[in-house]
Image: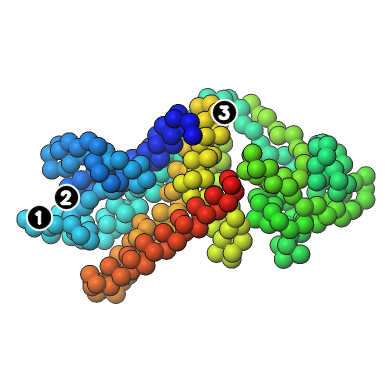
C-alpha cells in the first residue's frame, strides 16, 4: 500500500464530500437555516474552529461529511426560532437545500470535463464499430475476427439482450454487463454477413474484460470555446451510461461491476500513475456518480428526503418523527447492504 495513494484517495474523496456539503451549506445559510456544524469526514474531530454560529470541523475518517441543520432528526432546536429550522422554511427552499449538494457534484464534474477539453485542445471520440486490428492470441483472434470487420449487431446472454451498436463504447458497456457469457457478433465482411461467437477474458491487472478486437480512436482538434460543447456532451454521455447501469442493476444485470471504497482505492492507485489529467477525469466521474446517486429516491439520500418532503406538502400532513426515523433506518440498512455487497465484489476481484 503506497502512502501517496492513500493521500490521493483522501484528497479525492475529500474534494467530492466538501463540494457536496458546501452546496447544502450555502443554500441553507442563504435561506436563514441555523447550521451548528459543517464537517468534512466522520468520527473523532482532528480540527475544530467556530466562526459565528457555525463550527467547522475536519474529522478522522474521510468517508463522508455533513452539515448539521436545525430541525433535522437528532438536532437540538432549543432557543432556535422555528423559521430558522430546515422544517420552518418554505418547501421549495427545503428542496433546493436538499438538492444543492448533488447539483454541486454534477457542476464540479462538468467544470472538470470542460477544463480538460480546453487544456488539451483535442477531443478523443470512440469510432464506429469497425475493427481496426485483432490482438494476437486474444479471444477475438481465436473466434475469427479480422481487421475491417464491421459489427452490425451483438447478442448477449443467449439473446436476452441484443444491441445494434453505434460505437465501440456501446459494445464495451454491454460486454461488462455480461462478462461470463459468450456473445454472438453479427459482422459484415467483404459484402458478406457472418456470425462470430466470442467470450471475453478478464484482465486482473487492469480490472477489465476484453476480447482483443481493437479500434482506432478519432482525435479531433477543437477551439477553446468548443470545449464547452464537448465537455457538456461528455457529461451527458456519462450521465446516460450511469442511468443505463442503474437500470441494469435493478434488473440484476452487471452486479459484478458494482464497486465500493476498496474498488475506488484500487482505481485511484492505478489512475494516479497516469498523471494529473487522469486523476481529474476520475474525480469528475466519481463526483458525477455521487451527484446522481444522491438524487435517487431512496430513504436517507437527498433524493429520498426530497420525495418525503413533497409527500408531506401534497398530503398536508406532517410525518410523525417515529415514522420518519423508521424510514431513515430502512435507508441506512439499504445503503449498508449495498456497501457490503460492493466491497465483497471489490475483494473478490482483487484476491
Per the image, label 2 sits on a secondary structure element best described as loop
Q: Nearer the viewer, mark 3 or mark 2?
A: 3
The answer to whether the residues at label 2 and label 1 have Cβ atoms under 8 Å apart is yes
From the viewer's side, name the closer residue of 177 and 126.
Answer: 177
Of badges 3 and 1, nearer the viewer stands: 3
Residue 34 is tagged as 2
Residue 22 located left or right of residue 234: left
Q: Which residue is mark 1?
A: 80
Image position of 275 (left or right of 311): right
Residue 255 pos. (x, y %):
58, 58
SS at mark 1? loop
Q: Which residue is mark 3?
A: 274
Q: Which mark is residue 322?
A: none
| Residue under the point 85% across and 53% down | 196
Across and down, in percent, residue 140 comes to 82, 45
Residue at mark 3 to residue at mark 1: CA–CA distance? 51 Å
Q: CA distance from mark 2 to mark 1?
A: 8 Å
* Secondary-structure class at tag 3: loop
Amino acid at each position: 500500500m503506497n502512502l501517496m495513494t492513500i493521500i490521493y484517495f483522501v484528497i479525492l474523496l475529500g474534494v467530492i464530500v466538501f463540494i457536496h456539503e458546501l452546496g447544502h451549506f450555502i443554500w441553507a445559510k442563504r435561506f436563514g437555516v441555523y447550521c451548528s456544524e459543517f464537517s468534512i469526514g466522520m468520527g473523532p474531530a482532528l480540527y475544530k474552529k467556530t466562526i459565528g454560529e457555525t463550527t467547522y470541523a475536519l474529522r478522522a475518517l474521510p468517508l463522508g461529511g455533513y452539515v448539521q441543520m436545525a430541525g433535522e432528526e437528532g438536532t437540538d432546536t432549543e432557543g432556535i426560532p422555528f423559521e430558522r429550522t430546515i422544517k420552518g422554511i418554505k418547501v421549495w427552499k427545503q428542496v433546493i437545500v436538499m438538492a444543492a449538494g448533488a447539483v454541486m457534484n454534477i457542476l464540479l464534474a462538468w467544470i472538470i470535463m470542460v477544463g480538460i477539453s480546453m487544456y488539451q485542445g483535442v477531443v478523443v471520440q470512440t469510432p464506429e464499430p469497425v475493427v481496426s486490428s485483432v490482438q494476437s492470441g486474444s479471444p477475438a483472434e481465436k473466434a475469427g475476427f479480422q481487421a475491417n470487420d464491421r459489427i452490425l449487431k451483438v447478442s448477449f446472454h443467449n439473446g436476452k439482450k441484443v444491441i445494434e451498436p453505434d460505437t465501440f463504447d456501446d459494445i464495451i458497456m454491454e460486454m461488462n454487463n455480461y462478462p461470463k457469457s459468450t456473445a454472438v457478433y453479427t459482422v459484415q465482411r467483404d459484402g458478406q454477413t457472418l456470425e462470430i461467437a466470442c467470450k471475453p477474458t478478464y484482465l486482473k491487472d487492469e480490472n477489465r474484460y476484453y476480447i482483443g478486437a481493437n479500434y482506432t480512436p478519432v482525435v479531433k482538434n477543437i477551439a477553446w470555446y468548443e470545449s464547452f460543447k464537448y465537455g457538456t456532451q461528455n457529461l451527458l454521455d456519462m450521465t446516460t451510461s450511469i442511468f443505463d447501469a442503474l437500470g441494469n442493476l435493478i434488473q440484476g444485470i452487471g452486479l459484478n461491476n458494482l464497486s465500493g471504497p476498496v474498488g475506488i482505492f484500487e482505481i485511484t492507485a492505478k489512475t494516479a500513475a497516469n498523471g494529473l489529467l487522469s486523476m481529474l477525469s476520475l474525480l469528475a466521474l466519481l463526483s458525477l456518480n455521487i451527484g446522481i446517486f444522491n438524487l435517487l429516491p431512496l430513504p436517507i439520500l437527498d433524493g429520498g428526503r426530497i420525495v418525503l418532503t413533497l409527500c408531506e406538502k401534497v398530503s398536508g400532513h406532517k410525518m410523525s418523527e417515529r415514522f420518519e426515523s423508521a424510514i431513515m433506518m430502512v435507508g441506512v440498512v439499504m445503503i449498508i447492504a449495498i456497501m457490503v455487497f460492493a466491497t465483497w465484489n471489490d475483494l473478490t476481484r482483487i484476491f
